[in-house]
Amino acid sequence: MQAGARAGKGRIGMIGTGAIGGFYGVMLARAGHDVHFLLRSEFAAVAEDGLRIASDVHGALSLDPVQAYRSAEQMPPCEWLLVGAKTTSNADLAPAIIQAAADGAKVLLLQNGLDVEADLRPLLPESLHLLGGLCLICVNRVGPGIIAHQALGAVNIGYHSGPCQGQAERMAVVEAAADLFRSAGIDSQAMPDLQQARWQKLVWNVPYNGLSVLLAASTSPLMASDQSRGLIQALMGEVVRGAQACGYEIAAGYADYLFTMTEKMPDYWPSMYHDYAHKRPLELDAIYARPLAAARAAGCELPKIEALYQALAFLDRRNR
Ligand SMILES: NC(=O)C1=CN([C@@H]2O[C@H](COP(=O)(O)OP(=O)(O)OC[C@H]3O[C@@H](n4cnc5c(N)ncnc54)[C@H](OP(=O)(O)O)[C@@H]3O)[C@@H](O)[C@H]2O)C=CC1
Ligand SMILES: CC(C)(CO)C(=O)C(=O)O
């Protein structure tokens, strides 16, 4: 499909162009969508040299020139706004989102964690749809505008809040979002319940993200030791219990499936490890504090996750 041929499906604005924003933005632009990228520290490099992906799945991909912006004020109105920034900056992103949004735009947070919409929703007009997307992918930034893609790629999407009346209308918006990704060759599922999808993703992120920082270990060594394997399984079990206490059933065998999937994945450093190594804030609220608070409010204590969170909060404070 020629560039621009899909522009009629709605202009896309990428708010935050790091590993996730860069990867999905390039895939969508290469499929012919009209994609506009908001950047911060990497603006000059990307405006000059474009975006490049070294993918172990798709080979070398690039986008040059890039419709790159340093400020949302210069962006054209976008029908879709995909947020690729970390959850730690969600409240700060509201002015940029509002500035770049067309009337009735759909805002999709491509972010891990629970209740990540909570800081942002009250700052957005009611006319904007807010959706969440859980990305099953291994990507990281390796240089300005350069992204390494190691494995996977699917995006599971659910509706959070907005003008839709009733589940049928909500699912129509979610299906349209999933279609956008599918049109770029990316697997995407429309999820009937976003909270359920967020809890499900935490089964992976709670053990691996935190332990990569605490133990300074990527997935291969974590999967090679009986001690860390036992700890990962215990943490996964607590996430499943927390979800159940909050009314979300995680399918029997799902934790085992993720455990086995990780054994087959190439060695991988989760995004939280990269944040720690670069002295950026860790997504501790989204991945630990909010799930712990939700479970506690439902009468369920999760002691191993609590201990992991306390240790990570200590490290995060000392790191900055
Ligand atoms: N990486 C992965 O494999 C996966 C990540 N996720 C989730 O995806 C989300 C994004 O992660 P990831 O892509 O790894 O993060 P990155 O750190 O790679 O990217 C975040 C980007 O957002 C930009 N940004 C932040 N604030 C602003 C702002 N105010 N204006 C403009 N740009 C801004 C950053 O710019 P700057 O360079 O200036 O900081 C950076 O380019 C997280 O919630 C993560 O948990 C989910 C699955 C897998
Ligand atoms: C599970 C994994 C590695 C790939 O989906 C991921 O999503 C993450 O790093 O957050």
Image: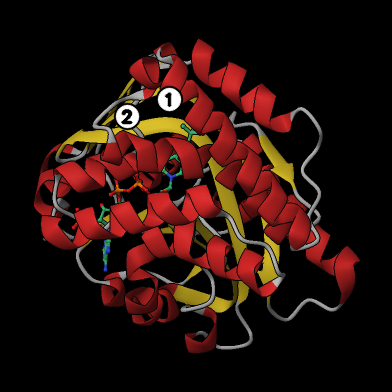
Marks 2 and 1 in Cβ contact (< 8 Å): no
**Residue 178: image location, x then y, percent:** 68, 46
Percent coordinates x, y for residue 65 in the rendering: 24, 41
The answer to which of 31 and 187 lies nearer the viewer is 187
In the structure shown, which secondary structural element does the residue marked by tag 1 occupy? helix
Q: Is 105 positioned to the left or the right of 78 in the image?
A: right
Residue 219 position (above or below residue 155): above
Residue 35 visible in the picture = no
Residue 109 appears in the picture as rendered: yes
- Amino acid type, callout 1: Ser
In terms of image quadrants, where is residue 309? bottom left
Observer-side mark, 2 or 1, equals 1
Badge 1 residue CB within 8 Å of ligand 2: no
Q: x and y percent of residue 284 in the render?
A: 38, 59
Q: Nearer the viewer, residue 136 or 1?
A: 136
Residue 228: numbered disc:
1
The residue to which callout 2 is attached is 269
At a point 31% along the width and 51% down the height, the residue shown is 17
Amino acid, disc 2: Trp
